[in-house]
Image (cartoon, grey):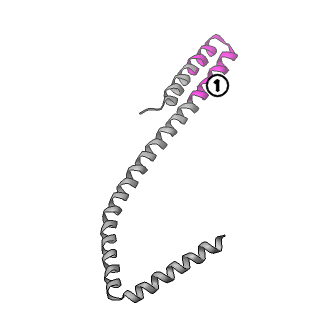
Amino acid sequence: MVDTDRIVGAAKDVGGRVQSAAGDLTGSSRDSAEGRFREAQGRAQEVYGQTKDTLRDVADDVTEYAGDAYDRVSNRGGAYLRDGTRAVETQVGENPFVALLIAGAVGYGLALLLHARR
């Protein structure tokens, strides 16, 4: 989709060229200068529109790439999560006392952190 600034800028550029040429033909330095000014404004607005289009395209590409990367990671991440869950279940089943000590230590550490913030 073309940005409206590109279209308006191109129109100003053409209008400025016409006014500048008319000013040159009639010898009107005012029309010639105004035409060149409108031409410059039109070019600047057209470049601004092109920049917006480019940034919009880049943002769309980044969004698409991020979505693809998330899909790839989430598909693999589910497998890692299942494998990790099984490993933890095995360790807790084999060593329940050690798991209880670790859980208690983590809980105590969190309590200290929360209490220290007050």
- According to the image, label 1 marks what residue? 37
Q: Nearer the viewer, residue 17 or 99?
A: 99
Residue 58 higher or lower than 80, as above or below: above
Residue 50 higher or lower than 103, as above or below: above
Magenta span contains residue 117:
no
Magenta span contains residue 32:
yes
Q: Position of residue 36 (x, y in %)?
A: 63, 24
Q: Nearer the viewer, residue 11 or 94?
A: 94
Which of the image's four quarters has the N terminus? top left
Residue drawn at x 46%, y 84% is 102
Q: Position of residue 84 (x, y in %)?
A: 34, 75
Binning the other alpha carbons within 10 Å of mark 1 as few (below 14), some (14 to 19) or many (20 upward) gives: some
Q: Position of residue 100 (x, y in %)?
A: 43, 84
Q: Judge left or right: residue 4 versus residue 70.
A: right
> Residue 75's quadrant in the figure?
bottom left
Residue drawn at x 61%, y 23% is 38
Residue 13 higher or lower than 54, as above or below: above
Q: Position of residue 115 (x, y in %)?
A: 62, 74
Residue drawn at x 53%, y 31% is 46
Could you tell me the amino acid type at mark 1?
Phe
Q: Nearer the viewer, residue 69 or 84?
A: 84
Residue drawn at x 49%, y 36% is 50
Residue at the limit of the structure toward the top, as seen here:
26
Number of on-image labels = 1
Q: Nearer the viewer, residue 81 or 51?
A: 81
Residue 69 higher or lower than 100, as above or below: above
Q: Judge left or right: residue 90 versus residue 49.
A: left
Q: Main secondary structure of the magenta part?
A: helix
Which of the image's four quarters has the C terminus? bottom right
SS for callout 1: helix
Part of the protein shown in magenta: 16-42
